[in-house]
Amino acid sequence: MNSEKNQLTEDWDMVIEPRSSLFSLNLREVWRHGYLLMMFVRRDLVSVYKQTILGPLWFFIQPLLTTITFTIIFGNIAKISTDGLPQVLFYMSGITLWNYFSDCLTNTSNTFTTNASIFGKVYFPRLVMPLSRAISGLAKFGVQFLLFVVFLVYYKMTGSDVHPDIIGILMVTPVVVIILAGLALGLGLILSAMTTKYRDLFFLITFGIQLLMYATPVIYPISSMDAKFRWLIQANPISWLVEAFRHVYLGAGELSVPGLAYSFGVMAVILVIGTVVFNRVEKTFMDTV
Amino acid sequence: MRTVINVEDISKQYRLGLVGTGTLKDDMYRWWYRIQGKEDPLLKVGEVNDRSKKGTSDYVFALKDVGFDVKQGEVLGIIGKNGAGKSTLLKVLSRTTSPSTGRIRIKGRVASLLEVGTGFHPELTGRENIFLNGAILGMTKQEITRKFDEIVDFSGVERYIDTPVKRYSSGMYVRLAFGVAAHLESEILIVDEVLAVGDIEFQKKSLGKMGEVSRQGGKTVLFVSHNMISIGSLCNKLLVMKHGQVDFHGDVKEGLNYYINHMQHVIESSDLSESLKALPEDEFFELLDFDLKQEHSDGVVFLSSRPIKVCYRYRIKKRITGLRIGFDFIEQKSEMTLFTVFHDDSYKTVEPWQEGVYTSEAIIDAHLLREGSFIINIAVCIHNVRWIINGELKVPLEVRNIEGITPVYGFEKRPGFLLPPIAWRNEPAGE
């Protein structure tokens, strides 16, 4: 009898309770679902371009067309400065980074609504889903990044005024990508938690991402910014990433360590808030979605 | 055996109606109370969830103070009307939603099958989907690889394994999906009516697989179904849910009887007596009472394994010759008359009736009907002269087969309305 009582107080594998503390994040559980994460990434990659004729070529076509458009409109018609860099490379570098950020943000922000049918039927740590989106986004980013490198090599060989810094590239690239991914994921998590209850936000997100792009030095360099507004652009953590990226690959733009540190700090805060908010919603979202 | 699932006072509250402007206000209200360290004030407003009655509050409890234990190796059936809280209970147990109050403790790995094929992607091939679906259901890569051949074999889709599942027939799709689910390695399995899919052959296969899983593996199974036959044949314990509360928890036979006896009636007995009163007056005949009887039955739901008595009580007002009392037995959905009988079907001569009060009783044999919804149309006539009652009084009855004949192959989808015990003799005939 005594032992049975003991058994009732301990030795349970799982306890389901209404509300757990704010920070019981269960990250270990996410880790244990690594294989599931992998499968979701695979699914995203395999399924997107099935039954399209050009298949993964679309990964290239999209940034190419955008670059051409930007070169014509912002470079040739509006004549916005590109810090003395070849326009194609300047825009392409910005677009490659920005595309990853915006894809990742849109894809994670609708985690709950697009996966309601799965979430309603099976339990697994919900965090796996947005994580898989961020990772499968990296694959697309990788392809577009390669395209950028090909163009960079071509321009360098034809004697354009670009100065890639190999050591800088090796050191800065992972930092930039990690901070960018963290920012997109964190923001996406916060938004996904909010959109489950207040759908209005969906309309704001697309609009907001567009606005944010103009507040990021994608189509212009920070150096061309009026000093009066420069702080506004500098407050945007993504600005520092784009500038640092351009600096190491193209040799123009501002590589600022405090700037990157600031970006990292913002990323960390947003990511923590995002994870907490997301965890909170994941328990009851089926009732509100 | 130790307790592997311990459910303590689980409640789940939902808000009724549209989620509109009220929610933000309520959210603030809740938040205000929470930061003061008080209990959620809106949580008290709810009441027992009875769909048929309009409540006074916008909040209802889909589950209210539900508590029970499940021991290792038990196969617990969960039954109840729509809206009784079965699905909510499963959702809470499988962690797709969180309870409002209470606590559940579980020992062992849980696999929940609230649906087959969760997360199947139409563009992916059968092979890819087995791995994806298996991972979603909580299997590791090694487990899936190890069981892969078994799954393919079980579902019989070997030829199409590298074809996208969107090209599958619905039957193949379901078989593959169930195949993955059936090979889960977990100590506790939660199943929600997934067996109601596929063709008969496959249903039998999956039912068999479930039975095998619980008998051999010592697995604990929670099985929600409307189908009393499969519950009766698979489960050893039963939980009857009613208005979000546990109405009965115990042995399955006892539980099914309890459930049948306490199901809400299609027709209240008061309706019948009112219809009796509403009958047009007749100079010869007055029907005083009519009743369907069966041991342990409530008069609406009957077991096919026991005889049903059809009872009349009536008054003859004037001496009359050729009065016949009987009924048509009609299958509800098809409106097909299965048989028509009269009280004097076996008589050789016709005697006139004297004035007075009489009773008549017809007995429908056990093991004649199969599960279904039927109607008894009361018929009274003066032979070759006129009808006294025909069509004015129709009494519905539900027949359930929980302890009757259950053929090996099941008969849920076989055509026909009767299930008489037909004797067979099969012998080798030689050459």
Image (spheres, rainbow, N blue to C red):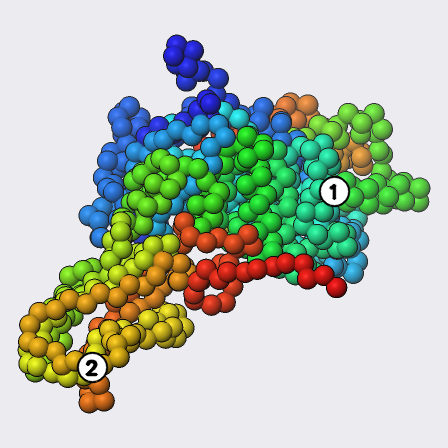
Q: Amino acid at mark 1?
A: Asp
Secondary structure state at the residue bearing disc 2: loop
Residues at marks 1 and 2 touching, judged by CB atoms closer than 8 Å: no
Vertical side of B243 occupied by A254: above or below: above
Q: Residue at x 38, y 73 (%)?
A: B338
Q: Nearer the viewer, residue B301 or A70?
A: B301
Farthest residue in the top direction? A2
A183 over B280 or under it: above or below:
above
Subunit that carries the residue with mark 1 = B
Q: Can you identify the residue that label 2 sits on?
A: B350
Residue A242 visible in image? no
Residue sitting nearer the eye, B288 or B69: B288
- Disc 1 crowd rating (10 Å Cα; few below 14, some 14-19, many 20+) is few
Frontmost residue, A78 versus B57: B57
Amino acid type, callout 2: Val
Which element type, helix, strand or loop, lies under badge 1?
helix
